[in-house]
Amino acid sequence: MFPGRTKGDREKIHRRFALDLTNRCTVEYNFCYQKEAAGELDRLVNRLSYVADCIIDCYTGHCGDTCRAYSYICKGTESDFWGKEFLPEHARCLYMTEDDENLVRNCMNIRFGRKNLEKTRFGTSTQKCEATNRGYNKSNPKDITFQRNFSC
C-alpha cells in the first residue's frame, strides 16, 4: 500500500499516514459536531459513516464526488482539498486492496464507531478531573496518615 524503495521508506510513510489519518478524523469529527450534529448521536453516527467512506476514497485518489457530498474539509477540487503531505511528490495516492481498506476503516471506527461517539459526543474530556486528582495526591500523599503523624 505504501510506496517506497526500502522498508525504512515505507515505514516512514506508514507513520506519517497514521498521523495524517488521526488528524483528518479529528478535524472531520470537530466540523461535523459543530455544523451538523451538536450532540445528537444518531445524526453524528450517520454523517460520520459517510465521512469514513469519503476518506478512503480521498486517500486512494478518487477524491471528487464523495468528498464534495460528505466531507467537511475536503471539497475534491484543485484549490480546496485535504493535502497529503505524508506521501512523496511522485506518489500522491495509495493503492489499497480490500484488506487495506477494511484495515483503514477499522482504524477509523476507533474514532467514528458508535460506542466511542457515545462517550465523546458532548466534547468533554477527563483532563480537569485528572489534574484535580494529581493535585490531591501531591498535597495529601498516600504514605502519610493523619492518625499516625498528627495528634488528635
Image (tube, grey):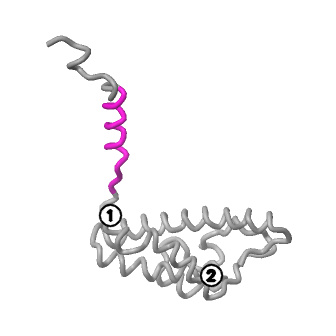
The amino acid type found where label 1 is placed reads Lys
Q: Is residue 150 left or right of residue 1?
A: left
Q: Determine crowd level at label 2: few under 14, some 14-19, many 20+ residues with C-alpha closer than 10 A.
A: some
Residue 92 horizontal/vertical position (percent): 73, 75
Q: Which residue appears farthest toward the left when viewing the image?
A: 152
The amino acid type found where label 2 is placed reads Asp
Q: Is 145 located above or below residue 6 in the figure? A: above
Residue at (49%, 77%) from the top-left corner? 71
Q: Determine crowd level at label 1: few under 14, some 14-19, many 20+ residues with C-alpha closer than 10 A.
A: few
Residue 2 horizontal/vertical position (percent): 73, 74
Residue 129 horizontal/vertical position (percent): 31, 43
From which residue to which does the magenta span run? 124-138
* The one of 2 and 144 positioned closer to us in this rendering: 144
Kind of element beneath mark 2:
helix
Residue 69 horizontal/vertical position (percent): 48, 84
Q: How many marks?
A: 2
Q: Which mark is residue 119?
A: 1
Gap in Å between the C-alphas at discs 2 and 1?
27 Å
* The one of 143 and 135 positioned closer to us in this rendering: 143
Who comes first in sequence, dot 2 or dot 1? 2
Q: Which residue appears farthest toward the front when viewing the image?
A: 148
Q: Which residue appears farthest toward the right when viewing the image?
A: 5
Q: Can residue 84 be found in the magenta stretch?
A: no
| Figure quadrant of residue 39 | bottom left
Which residue was labeled with disc 2?
A: 100
